[in-house]
Amino acid sequence: MSEAAEDVPGDERDDLDDIDDEGEPQYPTVDEWVEQVYVTTFIRWESDSVRWCPKWWAHPEAVVRLRALWQTWEVADADTGLAGMANWLRDYLDPLRVGLHDPAGPFSGCSSRRHAEQTPMATEPAPPGAWGLPVQT
């Protein structure tokens, strides 16, 4: 395994083993893929209906979506079949990008010039016995 791949946390690296003939991803981290592929290839003009934040890594939902795109892109890019990347565009990029850039999505308070911290949604504990477990007294 290359030195760069060793820097990838284990849970990310496990999903990417055997991506190419040597078992190495083309981009060993999600941030490299975002910087070198996503923002340079899949460009969208920021508007009322398209949001982006340069601090995308500070938005947990965005990280989940972009990581999923990166991992599946690595598999599609290594696919020697004719439809690998076309399938990736249809099955992964198009649907995940909608939620990523949606005005109510993870960048809802942001713009390309301003980052807004997100506040987690409020929760309350479930009442005793709500999950079908015996209530301890």
Image (cartoon, grey):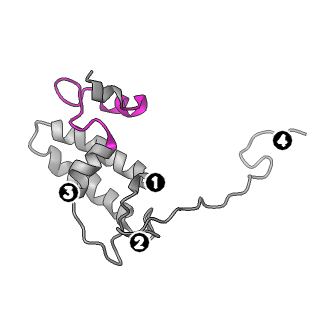
Indicate the position of residue 10 as horizontal and vertical percent values. 41, 28
Q: Residue furthest left?
A: 82
Indicate the position of residue 28 as horizontal and vertical percent values. 28, 35
Q: Amino acid at mark 3?
A: Thr
Crowding at dot 1, Cα within 10 Å, few <14 / some 14-19 / many 20+, comes out as: some
Q: Is residue 107 left or right of residue 74?
A: right
Indicate the position of residue 45 as horizontal and vertical percent values. 25, 71
Q: Is residue 77 left or right of residue 29?
A: left
Q: Nearer the viewer, mark 4 or mark 1?
A: 1
Total marks shown come to 4
Q: Which residue is mark 2?
A: 103
Q: Amino acid at mark 2?
A: Pro
Numbered badge on residue 48: none
Q: Nearer the viewer, mark 4 or mark 3?
A: 3
Please name the predominant secondary structure of the magenta segment in the image.
loop
Q: What stretch of residues is rendered in magenta?
A: 8-30
Q: Residue furthest right?
A: 137
Please give the name of the residue rendered at 28% of the width and 50% of the height, measured from the top-left corner. Answer: 34
Q: CA distance from mark 4 to mark 1?
A: 39 Å
Please give the name of the residue rendered at 49% of the width and 66% of the height, measured from the top-left corner. Answer: 116
Q: Which residue is mark 4?
A: 135
Please give the name of the residue rendered at 38% of the width and 70% of the height, measured from the top-left corner. Answer: 111
